[in-house]
């Protein structure tokens, strides 16, 4: 690699000529990106090999994080940062006439995730590598990531996200490591030496081909692997199937149907389509991932009794739960083990994280579908269920209710969460409140049966991407002020507490925030043609669009402010820019209406001379990881306003906190723990508490209609959704929104929490007027954010769940052969 700027420039030039055959003067930004990316990838190749060698020689336990989603975003900037060459490359490029930011912008986001769950997996990968743990990702190489969102006439329109169109400089295709995955067929059994042998006949075989992406640790040389699998057919698999005149066309059709397995990332649960294909994806990942892990394990020639001491398999929500029956299948059918032994090994190898208690997101698969698609796996699930129910019967004789709650197969459905709990040794929630709710409500009988299995691991975010890369000026200020220790242990950011009242430090913080706001304002103007004032409060809500997240509460507050301004144009108000970014699942009608409502309000407010100097509303199209990196450092106010008890953790809340925004939020998810750290003064808490929400659900004592009749402001807002007026173009335009609030009794308590939300927003309006007061509170937030660094979270997973130790060797001096 290069050890100084001049070397970098020289190597870069040579490659440009050598690879693309063009001189510097003719290179386009895209060429520069490709060359730079391939330089980095090749450079880390050596350390990649060294790391694998070191892990192998050491022979210690390794973790495989199975996830249907990895929301990696762009990799170039972070890789340069982690390698410690970011500034050198920036300067070198600039001397060659290129700005690094423009080069970074050439990279397509790897948007292989819906939201928090997928981004968490990506943050965890960064922490694992940066702390020196042997922890790898296992996922699917979707041809299309989450859809690209366009806003047309205020409505969301979905386009395919063909992120691989220009190639992917980070991945290495490894066809020699492909494995076979089987679907369909029928199971035959026979007896051999007193044992039952099972064989699946006439199955459809497909290839799973891995692509490896290096995961580069921060300044420590080691490189882990994200292995993503692609589904392929092969002539070798199809041979003989398609003879005759039509054969060739049939083959093409067959090929396409197989490739469709890794074609699309499914949008979240609000969409009913393609269920079988989604099940295929889940099994595809589980089977391919396991086979590749076990192939490596086999090379060590260890007995399978040791598997749980050498390997931990973590399942990110229930999506990869099929690793449990699949591991059983391999141990029994392929390795010839008995049931009890296989079960002992499997349930000591797998650990499970739950990410949501929303009942509609708890996965259930129809029995007939699983039985047909995965006949042998289904038999094993049935047997797991049979044995588990027998155990329950013995333990709780006559308690039928408990049996019906806990059974894995119930009615005609397989409950994946039940299977995941029964077949794993650890079940964790993602924030203290969430874990308590799991233990005391959602998973109560399981917690009674397996109390030691349950534990909490509050989520975290990588400060390398979300602070050092997204907000380099702020990171630089921290270094000047505190030294560099916090970079390796972000809890050291509490050192900032000394500076909350320091006026020159405050000034620096304010200047940085202003720069970030100006940068975002520039983007908003160029992309959406809306001019916003960087001196106004930037009030931001960015996350998936969902009823429980209550973007509706936010927009209703804005409508209310507008109403007030129209009534009294002299109304005193600190100018505010309300920024939204959110994708709605394509089949989620109500969510799409809310997007339309936000855009209608934006259109009216932004064009009204009486309002536009005080309120601006911006809906940013196509929210993504890279857009988040631009938006979050520019925020003053972070909106974390979910119905209490519904947001398992939230991780956006942590990103905003780390970048010095103040949170307006409910006592939900990790907000509760943020509040514990910073206290009442530095966080704006409002609304129902989780117990109150539960109580309302239990007693049915809430009447949205009554609420709306009591509060004149609400009555007016509801009217404005269905009558022609400032926010609608025709009558009943927002009928679905209206009905969700009134006819369906406001499932998420938007109307109930409205008054408290308005009052709390009014406090924010006042406090922002005193820049020193505001900035002091912002600094207190930054100071406490270190607790939410994913490095801390990952250490807890490593110590309490996985029992793995970091590599303590500096691998860069190893000889590679
Ligand atoms: C559900 C489903 C169901 C099947 C179809 C595909 C699909 C995709 C996504 C989902 C929802 C996943 C749940 C999720 O994203 N949970 C979020 O996890 C974050 C990380 O733990 C946490 O911070 C958020 O509070 C939680 O909503």
Image: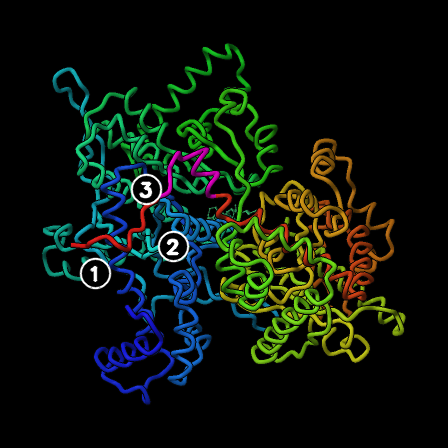
Q: Which residue is mark 1?
A: 252
Placement of 416 over or under 781, stated as above or below: above
Residue drawn 51% across and 12% down?
396
For mark 1, give the secondary structure.
helix
**Cα–Cα span, label 1 and label 2:** 42 Å
- Ranked by sequence position, the earlier of labels 3 and 2 is 2
**Cα–Cα span, label 3 and label 1:** 26 Å
Residue drawn 48% across and 50% down?
120
Q: Which residue is mark 2?
A: 217
Between circles 1 and 2, the one closer to the viewer is 2
Placement of 197 over or under 163, stated as above or below: above
For mark 3, give the secondary structure.
helix
Q: Nearer the viewer, residue 730 or 94?
A: 94
Placement of 191 over or under 659, stated as above or below: above
Give left or right: position of 207 versus 568. Answer: left
What's the mark number on residue 635?
A: none
Task: Name the quadrant of the N terminus.
Answer: bottom left
Give left or right: position of 476 versus 693. Answer: left
Q: Residues within 10 Å of mark 2 (few under 14, many from 20)?
A: many
Residue drawn 19% across and 21% down?
196
Q: Which residue is mark 3?
A: 286
Q: Position of residue 31 (x, y in %)?
A: 33, 79
- Ranked by sequence position, the earlier of labels 3 and 1 is 1
Residue numbers of the magenta segment: 794-807
For mark 2, give the secondary structure.
loop
Q: Is residue 801 magenta?
A: yes
Q: Quadrant of residue 772?
A: bottom right
């Amino acid at each position: 690699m290069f050890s100084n700027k001049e070397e970098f420039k020289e190597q870069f030039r040579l490659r440009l000529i050598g690879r693309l055959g063009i001189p510097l003067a003719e290179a386009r930004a895209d060429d520069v990106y490709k060359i730079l990316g391939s330089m980095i990838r090749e450079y880390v190749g050596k350390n990649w090999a060294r790391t694998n060698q070191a892990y192998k020689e050491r022979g210690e336990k390794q973790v495989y994080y199975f996830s249907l989603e990895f929301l990696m975003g762009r990799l170039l900037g972070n890789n340069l940062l982690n390698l410690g060459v970011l500034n050198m490359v920036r300067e070198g490029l600039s001397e060659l006439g290129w700005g690094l930011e423009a080069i970074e912008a050439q990279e397509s986001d790897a948007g292989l995730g819906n939201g928090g769950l997928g981004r968490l997996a990506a943050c965890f990968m960064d922490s694992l590598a940066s702390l020196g743990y042997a922890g790898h990702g296992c996922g699917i190489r979707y041809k299309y990531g989450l859809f690209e969102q366009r806003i047309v006439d205020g409505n969301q329109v979905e386009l395919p996200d063909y992120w691989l169109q220009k190639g992917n400089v980070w991945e290495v295709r490894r066809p020699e490591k492909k494995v076979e995955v089987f679907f369909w067929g029928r199971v035959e059994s026979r007896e051999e030496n007193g044992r039952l042998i099972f064989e699946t006949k006439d199955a459809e075989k497909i290839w799973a081909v891995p692509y490896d992406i290096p995961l580069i640790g921060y300044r420590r040389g080691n490189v882990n692997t994200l292995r993503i699998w692609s589904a392929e057919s092969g002539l070798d698999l199809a041979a003989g199937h398609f003879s005759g005149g039509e054969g060739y066309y049939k083959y093409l059709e067959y090929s396409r149907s197989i490739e469709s397995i890794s074609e699309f990332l499914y949008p979240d649960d609000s969409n009913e389509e393609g269920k079988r294909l989604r099940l295929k994806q889940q099994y595809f990942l589980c089977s391919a991932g396991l086979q590749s892990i076990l192939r490596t394990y086999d090379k060590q020639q260890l007995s399978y009794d040791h598997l749980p001491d050498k390997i931990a398999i973590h399942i990110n929500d229930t999506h990869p739960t099929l690793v449990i029956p699949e591991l059983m299948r391999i141990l029994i059918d392929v390795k010839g083990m008995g049931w009890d032994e296989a079960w002992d090994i499997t349930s000591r190898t797998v650990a499970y994280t739950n990410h949501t208690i929303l009942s509609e997101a708890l996965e259930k698969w129809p029995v007939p579908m699983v039985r047909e698609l995965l006949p042998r796996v289904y038999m094993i699930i049935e047997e797991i269920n049979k044995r588990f129910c027998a155990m329950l019967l013995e333990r709780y004789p006559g308690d039928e209710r408990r049996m019906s709650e806990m059974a894995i197969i119930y009615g005609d459905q397989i409950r994946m969460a039940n299977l995941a709990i029964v077949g794993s040794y650890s079940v964790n929630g993602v924030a203290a409140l969430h874990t308590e709710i799991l233990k005391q409500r959602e998973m109560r009988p399981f917690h009674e049966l397996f109390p030691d299995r349950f534990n909490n691991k509050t989520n975290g975010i990588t400060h390398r991407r979300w602070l050092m890369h997204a907000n380099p000026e702020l990171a630089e200020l921290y270094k000047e002020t505190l030294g560099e220790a916090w970079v390796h242990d972000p809890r050291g950011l509490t050192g900032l507490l000394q500076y909350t009242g320091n006026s020159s430090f405050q000034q620096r913080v304010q200047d940085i925030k202003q720069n970030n706001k100006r940068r975002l304002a520039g983007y908003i103007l160029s992309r959406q043609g809306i001019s916003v004032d960087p001196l106004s409060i930037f009030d931001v809500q960015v996350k998936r669009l969902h009823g429980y997240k209550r973007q509706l509460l936010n927009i209703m507050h804005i409508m209310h402010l507008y109403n007030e301004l129209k009534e009294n144009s002299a109304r005193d108000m600190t100018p505010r820019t309300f920024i939204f970014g959110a994708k709605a699942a394509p089949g989620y009608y109500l969510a799409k209406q809310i997007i339309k409502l936000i855009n209608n309000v934006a259109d009216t407010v932004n064009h009204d001379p009486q309002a536009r100097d005080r309120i601006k509303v911006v809906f940013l199209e196509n929210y993504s990881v890279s857009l988040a990196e631009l938006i979050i450092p520019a925020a003053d106010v972070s909106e974390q306003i979910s119905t209490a008890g519904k947001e398992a953790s939230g991780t956006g809340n942590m990103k905003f906190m780390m970048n010095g925004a103040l949170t307006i939020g409910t006592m939900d998810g990790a907000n509760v723990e943020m509040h514990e750290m910073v206290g009442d003064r530095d966080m704006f808490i409002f609304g129902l508490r989780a117990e109150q929400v539960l109580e309302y659900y239990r007693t049915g004592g809430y009447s949205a209609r009554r609420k709306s009749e009591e509060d004149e402001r609400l009555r007016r807002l509801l009217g404005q959704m269905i009558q022609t007026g400032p926010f609608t173009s025709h009558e009943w335009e927002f009928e679905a929104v209206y009905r969700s609030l009134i006819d369906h009794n406001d499932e998420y308590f938007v109307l109930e929490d409205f008054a408290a939300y308005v009052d709390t927003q009014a406090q924010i309006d006042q406090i922002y007027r005193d820049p020193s007061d505001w900035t002091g509170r912002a600094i207190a937030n930054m100071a406490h954010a270190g607790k939410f660094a994913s490095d801390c979270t990952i250490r807890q997973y490593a110590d309490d769940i996985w029992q793995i130790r970091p590599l303590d060797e500096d691998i860069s001096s190893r000889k590679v052969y």
